[in-house]
Image: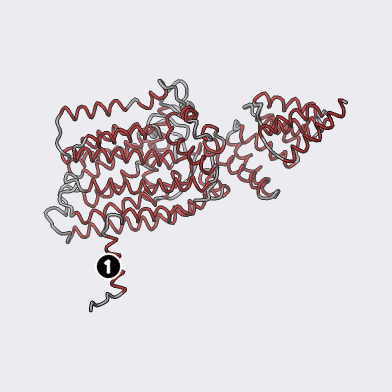
Amino acid sequence: MRRQEPLLTFWKRKALSFIHSAWFPYAVLAVLAWAVYANGMKAPFTLDDFSSIEDNPAIQDLKNIGAIWNFYTNRFLLYLSIAVNYAIHGTSLSGYHIVNISLHAINGMLVFRLLSTLLRLPVLNRALPQRHILWIALPGAALFICHPMQVNAVTYIIQRTTALAAAFSLLSLLFYLYFRLRDRNLYFMFCLVFMLFAMFTKENTIILPVLIAFMEFLLSRGFRKITTGKLITVFILLILFLPVIPASNLVLNGYNQSDPNSTFKASTSLNRLHYFYTQQNVIVTYIRQWFVPDNLCFDYSNHFSISKTLWENNAWLSMLVLILLGISAVFGLFYNKWISLGIGWFFIGLSVESSFISIKDVYFEHRMYFPMIGLCMVLIGLFFGWKHSVFQNRENVTGSGRKSLNAYGLLLGIMILAFTPVTIYRNYLFTDPVLLWSDVVKKAPGSSRGHSVLATSYLNKYEFEGEDPEYLTYAEKSFLESVRLDPKNDTSLCNLAKVYLLWGKLDACIETAKQALSVRKSVYAYHHLGQAYRKQGKYSLAAETLLKGYELDKKCSFILEALGDTYYDAGNMELAVKYYQEFLEYYIGDHVQERVDLLSSTVSDQIQ
C-alpha cells in the first residue's frame, strides 16, 4: 500500500513547484501592484482629469473616432482608451483605476522580461548562472512597481498616458531585442508597430529610435550577426520614424499643446536656456528621490526655483554631477556595460522633458516612470556587471559571488520594504483632495495653483458635504494666498468671488468678480457677478451682466438658469420662460420643469 505524503510536505512541494514555474514572477508582480495600489481606487478626478475626461465631449461617443483624433492627435490611443472606459461606466472612478493599476502591473512584468533577456546576454554577464537570473530581475521589476515616484503615473488617472506609452515602448524594445537575438523579421515589424503606438500615446516616445540605436551600439557583440545591408535598412526605417510626432502636427493638423510658433515647445513663458539650467537641478532631484523618496510632491507648479543662469541655485553643481555620471557611462563601455546601458537609458528617457524643450511645469514625478528602469539597470551593474566578474569561470555562485547576490537582494529588499508603505500612503492622500492639496502646499508653499486647488477642494466640501461655514473660511484663506502669489490667477479670483457670493458678502463678490474679468472673460465670473447684482435687487444690471456670459456660451446651463431666475424675480415672465426652456435643453430637473410649466401658464393667461 502506498504511503500517504504528509500534508506539510505536500504543500511545500507544491510551493516549490510554483516558485520554479514560469508564471511565478508574473504572479508576484501582479499581486504586488494590486497590494500597493488598491487603496487608491477611490481617488477622485483632479487637475487635467476634468478637462480630459469628465468635461470632454470628444471621448463621450466611442463611435466618433474622428472626434477623439481631432481632440489630441499625438495622444490618440490614450484618449481612445479613455473613451472605452467612458463607454462602459461613464465617470465612475473604479473602471479608470482598474485599467491604470493593471497597466502598471503589466509594465512591471515587461520590465522583468526586459531585465531577464538582458541578463542572458554574455556581452553583459560573462558567466552568470542562469538559475539566478530570476532573483536578479524580479527584485528590479518589483522596485519599479512599488516605488512611490510612480504614484502620479498610476493614481492620477489621465497620466495613464505615461504608463501606456511606457508599455508600448517596452514592447517595442523587447521585440527589437528578440529580432536581433533570433534574426526574425516579424519581430522587427512588431517593434515598429509598437513604436508607432507609443508615438500616438505620448510625445516623449520620439526617443525610441535613439534608444534602440544606443542599445545596438552597446550590445551588438551579443546579437546574432546580420548583413550590413540589412542593418542599414533597419536604421533607415528607425530614422523614418523620428518625424512621426511633428508630422502629425504639421501634416495631419492634429491638436497639440505646443504654442503655434514652435512644434517642440509646450510653454512660451519660459526661455529654453532657463528651462535647461533649471533641469540640471530637477534631474539631480529625481535621482536623489529615487534613492531616498523624501518630500515627494504631486504638483510643484511654479514653486520649483527657476535658474536663469547656470550659476543660480547651484545649477552648475548639478550639471557637474550629471557630467560625472556621463563620464561613468563612458568608463562603463570598457569595464561595466550595465552601468553604461542604465545611465544612457536614464538620460535618453529624460531627454525630451528635461532638456531644451521648455514645458510649463518644470518638475513632475511621473516623468521618471520610464527612465527609472535605467537606474534599476545601474544597480544590477554595480553588483554583477564588471568585466572581471566574480561569477567568471564559476559554475556555482560561491564565495564573493554569493556575497554579491546576497548584498543585491538585501539592498533591493530593504528598498522595497521601505518604499511600499510610502507608496500606499501617497495613494491614500489621493483619495481626499483636501489631504492631497494640503500636502502640496506644505511642500510647495509658493505654488499658486496648489493653493487654488486646495481652496476649490474646500469649496466642494462646503457644497457637497454639508454647508459648514468653516470650509468657506479655509477656502477664502487659500484663494487669497493663491492670488497673492499670482495676482493674474483668474481661476482663483473667480472662485473667491463665489465664496463671497455663498457667504452673502455681495460687495466683495462684485469687486472680486470684476478683477477676474479684467484678467479673462469667463462665464463663471459673469455668473457670480450677475448673481450678486440679482441678490442686491439690481435686476437690470444682473440681466445685462449675465447676457455677456450668455454671449460667451449660449449653452451654459448655469448662465441660462440664472437668467431665468433674474427675469422671474424682475417679473418678466416671458423672458423667464424663454431662458428656463433653453436651460431645460441642457439640464433636466423637476423643479425647473414645474417652474416653466407654471410660468408658461401665467404668460398664456396674461396674453389672453
Report x, y in % for residue 309.
41, 30
Q: Which residue is mark 1?
A: 13
Q: Residue furthest left?
A: 393
Report x, y in % for residue 489.
59, 33
User: Which quadrant, please, contains the C terminus?
Assistant: top right
Q: Residue at x 45, y 44 (%)?
A: 152
Residue 248 placement: quadrant: top left
Q: Amino acid at mark 1?
A: Arg
Mark 1: which secondary structure? helix
Q: Residue at x 42, y 54 (%)?
A: 34
Residue 253 placement: quadrant: top left
Report x, y in % for residue 190.
29, 36
User: Which quadrant, please, contains the N terminus?
Assistant: bottom left
Residue 324 in view of the camera: no
Q: Residue at x 42, y 42 (%)?
A: 366
Residue 218 placement: quadrant: top left
